[in-house]
Image (spheres, helix red, strand yellow):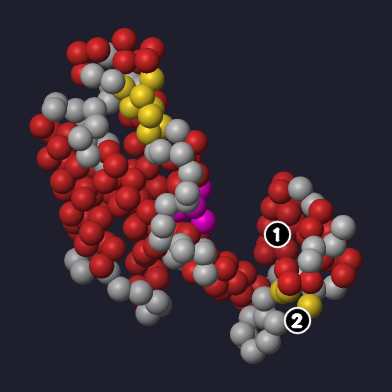
Amino acid sequence: MPAPASESFVYNPDMRSLNHVNLMVDTFIANANVEDLRATIRTLLATTPPSTAHAFTRAARSRLSNANASSLPPSLPLFTTSASLSNLHSNSGPEPVPTSGLHDALAHARCLYGAGMGLAALRIFAAIVRVTLGMRWSPMGPTSDVLSLIDAEICQAIQSSKEEIDAGRGEGSSVVELRALLQESERDVEGWGGDFPFERALGSLECWKI
């Protein structure tokens, strides 16, 4: 069935008006599966002028900015504890394990920095880093792996943030906040003898003078 009329709109790059989507196109959008929509969008952006991609990212930013972009998605806790892993690492206490809530938060952050909202993504990463303060994890466990992944993700968001600031769409308060949290995390991890997982991200932020 076609989507409700209130959802049947297309973004106009010049921002002067919103027009109704063609009924048949809207029927496809409302009923296509996620992979078909992804493939269609990628083909569209790869085979049209660069202005189409710019319009697409502006539309994405408009959508995300109206959806409380800087907040963590309301989902499960970011980490839980695993009884089996706790037994393996009893000397360091319960082992934290990433949950689907963390993966939802990372997907949200990727949407943000992918649409050119790196500064909002940094606030999501700051919330994640804050949760890890006081945690301990084994060097070969799932939490160590996901924190290393987050380190790389933050670096991507930093690049997006630089482009955002250069374009005059934001300022650096979230950069300063995340830098301070990463420095606190480094001290915290050193205190219990762990390997600091956000080394690349902290290095990039310390080199970025704001």
Please say whether residue 110 is one of the residues in the magenta stretch.
Answer: yes
Q: Is label 1 or label 2 in front?
A: 2
Quadrant containing the C terminus in the rendered view? bottom left
Tell me where the magenta segment starts and ends, as one range: 107-111
Q: Position of residue 31 (x, y in %)?
A: 81, 53
Mark number for residue 201? none
Task: Name the magenta segment's main secondary structure.
Answer: helix
* Residue bearing mark 2: 19
Amino acid beneath label 1: Ile
Q: Is residue 207 left or right of residue 7?
A: left
Q: Quadrant of residue 133?
A: top left
1 or 2: tag closer to the N-terminus: 2
Q: Is residue 35 left or right of residue 172?
A: right
Q: Is residue 130 left or right of residue 73?
A: left
Is 55 situated above or below 209? below
Q: Is any atom of residue 157 visible in this view? A: no
Q: Residue furthest top?
A: 87
* Residue bearing mark 1: 41
Is 186 situated above or below 30? above
Amino acid beneath label 2: Asn
Q: Quadrant of residue 1?
A: bottom right
- Residue at the spot 73% in from the left edge and 54% down from the top edge: 37
Q: Position of residue 173 (x, y in %)?
A: 25, 67
